[in-house]
Image (cartoon, rainbow, N blue to C red):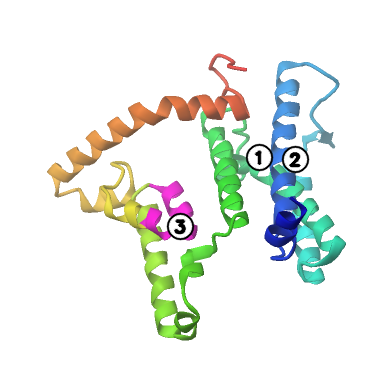
Amino acid sequence: MSDWWYRNIVEPGKLPLLLALLAFVLTFLITRCVTRLIRAGKGPFHDISAGGRHVHHVVPGVVLMLVGGFGGVATGGRGWAAALLAVVFGIGAGLVLDEFALILYMQDVYWSERGRQSVEVVLLTTALGGMLLVGFLPLGVDGLSPDDRDDRGNLIGTLLLHFVCALISLVKGKPKLAVLGVLVPVISIVGALRLARPDSPWAKRLYRRRPRARRRAERRARRHDARWAGPTRRLQDLVGGTPTGEREGT
């Protein structure tokens, strides 16, 4: 076990990433537990206010991210200081992304339906961090040979292809496939080739004069939502709490 730990985590320099990811997940889970207790009026916890203004935990989160990020760059990512700063960064990222929806909408939508996007972003970030930890490199360039890396033309072409596929997936209303496709290019390629979501910018512009393609996109979206919307919402409720106006599920 110790040999595996050194060979796969310590020697490749992935210990700061592991610590940051663990701190990120634990901070998010603890924060959600505390906010749910505050919401239910249980325990010793309460909202923090300063001068009559509610201070959201995104504020200390931003400070911790700055300290951990700039400090990590200054240390070069090595040594015990880098490991400590990685934990600081992970804690800050957990606090910030827990209120991602508030930043996106510039409103306190923490317990609303739109607040679910914070949970989605946290789950997606955790998946991406885990993929980086087990060896995936951005844009899939880890599969290139040394000769390919020397060939700048091939490398640039590969990067552009992956970027375009991820961008098309995003415009087609598939942000999760776009983000995951940055690390696993085949995912963004699938998203780019398949029909767009009917409410996406791609569909609104390009399916306007193609009623057949729009109907197909609507049928596919209904089937997808009918299959995955329920399990996805239950997972979000389990992790982040049920939005206001819905029955508490935890």
Q: Quadrant of residue 115?
A: top right
Q: Which mark is residue 98?
A: 1
Q: Quadrant of residue 185?
A: bottom left
Residue sitting at x 37%, y 47%: 173
244 or 213, which is in the foreground?
A: 213
Residue sitting at x 49%, y 80%: 149
What span is colored magenta in the figure? 174-188
Q: Mark 2 and mark 1 in contact? Answer it, CB < 8 Å.
A: yes
Secondary element at image label 2? loop
Q: Name the residue beneath numbered marker 3.
A: 184
Q: Disc 2 and disc 1: Cα gap in Å?
A: 9 Å
Residue sitting at x 54%, y 39%: 120
In the image, residue 175 lies at what x, y percent? Answer: 44, 49
Looking at the image, is mark 2 or mark 3 earlier in the sequence? 2
Kindly identify the amino acid type of the residue bearing the numbered disc 3: Val
Direction from residue 52 to residue 139 in the image, left or right: left
Does 15 lie within the magenta span?
no
In the image, residue 54 lies at what x, y percent? Answer: 76, 35
Kindly identify the amino acid type of the residue bearing the numbered disc 2: His
In the image, residue 190 lies at what x, y percent? Answer: 33, 53
Q: Name the residue beneath numbered marker 2.
A: 57
Secondary element at image label 3? loop
Question: Disc 1 vs disc 3: which is toward the camera?
Answer: 3
Q: Quadrant of residue 225?
A: top left
In the image, residue 39 lies at what x, y percent? Answer: 71, 21
Is 249 placed above or below 33 here?
above
Residue sitting at x 69%, y 41%: 25
Q: Look at the image and tell me whether residue 16 can be seen.
A: no
The quarter in which the C terminus is drawn is top right
